[in-house]
Image: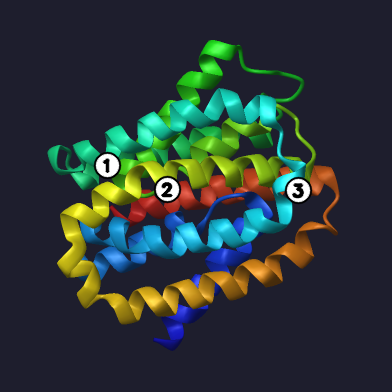
Amino acid sequence: MLFLFFLASIAGAIASVTGFGIGSILTPFVAFSVGTPLAVAAVSIPHFVGTAVRYATLWRHTSWSVLLRFGLASAAGGLAGALLQPVFGARGLTLLLGALLILTAIASLTGVLDHREWPRGLAVLLGGVSGTFGGLVGNQGGVRSGALLAFRLEPLAFIATATATGLIVDAARMPVYMARSADALAGAAQDIGVMTAGVVFGTMVGQRVLRRLPRELFRKIVGAAVGAIGLWLIVSA
């Protein structure tokens, strides 16, 4: 339990700085013991709570124009991914997601995304793709964060917009998980509570770090974190 709390705290702190990380870090770990479908459903609860806590202090910095491009498409993708989850093999999806994150990291760290803004249609597509992965395997933030880098938002606007999108996706996918796995989730209530407490604690600590980061260092941290999560997902699969 102590290690689970520690891991959830790390995930919450990373998410405060990068805009993602809760699902990407906790889901593979929980999946080792309960399987991917239940892990995705269980982690969605601390993910939602931590994301809501983070957004409560950042919502004023939201880039509403960018959120409108991502929000509805991400919600549709999240719902579709949650409904289609039983159809796809979790291992194949995890490998694909890992590869996408590594490519995203390479693009951001090499500057390929600098001074570019996605066309409206492509932004909508990327929002839908990230939401779909969130619904399927509980990992959406890396793809979403990689795409948001291209909009060259300031760190606080970046985190606020990414966080708002995460909340929208959670609202779309969680009812499906609850309906499908209510009994199993009730049996895992203690672990879910520990993860939720850890995520909230990490979120509060991480927000203090966020405000002190220079913009270029922030971008490098996001890119490196995307790549690291991608490698982890491939190895875990």
Task: Name the residue located 46 percent from the left edge and 20 percent from the top edge.
Answer: 125
Q: Which residue is mark 2?
A: 170
Secondary structure beneath dot 1 equals helix
First-in-chain label (1 vs 3): 1
List x then y, in percent, for residue 193: 40, 77
Q: How is the image coloured?
A: rainbow
First-in-chain label (2 vs 1): 1
Residue 42, image quadrant = bottom left
Q: Which residue is mark 1?
A: 82
Q: Which mark is residue 218?
A: 3
Judge by depth and name the residue closer to the eye, 221 or 1: 1
Secondary structure beneath dot 2 equals helix
For the residues carrying marks 1 and 3, which lies nearer the camera in this image? 1
List x then y, in percent, for residue 127: 49, 28
Q: Is residue 191 left or right of residue 146?
A: left
| Amino acid type assigned to the residue bearing label 1 in the image | Ala
